[in-house]
Amino acid sequence: MTVLRSKPRPASWPSRSGAHRITRPQKQRALRILRKLAHAIPRPVVELDHGNPLQLLVATILSAQCTDQRVNQVTRLLFSRYPSAGDYATADVRELESLVRPTGFYKSKARRLIACGRALVERFGGRVPGTMEELVTLPGVGRKTANVILGACFDTAAVIVDTHVARVAQRLELADSPDPDRIESTLQALWPERLWTSGSQRLLLHGRYVCLARKPQCERCAVYAECRWEGKRGR
Ligand code: SF4
């Protein structure tokens, strides 16, 4: 298979102050990419099974360094044993560790779940809060986790930046930096707000199933014509 080698074109939007300076053609191209991805991925869904914000918070914490499929296997039992934040707050750490063990890093994940449960009970009446400012005060919850929850459970426009989104955004020159916060704000500037959640979910799924880290499946890529990444494979 031919590997195309073209010089990467540097993104041109950062100003000296670091603020985003985005041109109309850049916005048009970003929308064109989203339209093509929307055609390939008509219904982007969060693949972590959940029925409420607490379950998605727990599943997202467990998904660090683990596949969603493995997390879903574990949460089937976990959610029935621990239905409320209070159940995590008062959990026996050994029992919780053994339940989440298949997801890896089980000791720290079990402790994080207990700490999160306590914080939810003590500060939020046992409910998962619905704002970025509140969510990131929870132990182990960063902007990525908060955006997953806001977009899926609170109908709030949210750009999720995980490892897949970061990789695809850079390869497609939708971002000029590997820094997740910078990628988040760049995508926010490129896309209209109503597309933040679905757009980032589509980039995520494209990265997970097509634009793989080591062997991108360029031959079946919906945005092939838009990609100028030097590692792109020929068709
Ligand atoms: Fe990724 Fe290949 Fe598509 Fe470019 S052409 S976005 S490298 S899958």
Image: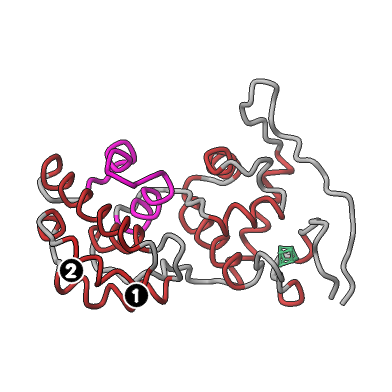
For residue 95, the mark is: 2
- Horizontal side of residue 234 vs 43, given as left or right: right
Determine the residue positioned at 72% across, 77% down.
220
- Horizontal side of residue 97 vs 219, given as left or right: left
Determine the residue positioned at 29% across, 43% down.
135
Q: Position of residue 173 (x, y in %)?
A: 72, 49
For residue 231, the mark is: none
Q: CA distance from mark 2 to mark 1?
A: 18 Å
Colour treatment of the image:
secondary structure
Span of residues in magenta: 129-153
Residue density around tag 1, few if under 14, some if 14–19, many if 20 or more, within 10 Å: some
Q: Position of residue 43 (x, y in %)?
A: 48, 71
Examine the rendered structure and indicate whether residue 189 appears above or below residue 144.
above
- Tell me the kind of residue under disc 1: Asn
Q: Find disc 1 in the rendering and name its residue.
A: 72
Q: Is mark 2 within 8 Å of ligand 1?
A: no
- Tell me the kind of residue under disc 2: Glu
Q: Position of residue 225 (x, y in %)?
A: 79, 64
- Residue 47 belongs to magenta span: no
**Mark closest to the chain's N terminus, 2 or 1:** 1
Examine the rendered structure and indicate whether residue 156 appears above or below residue 55.
above
Location of the C terminus by quadrant is: bottom right
Secondary element at tag 2: helix
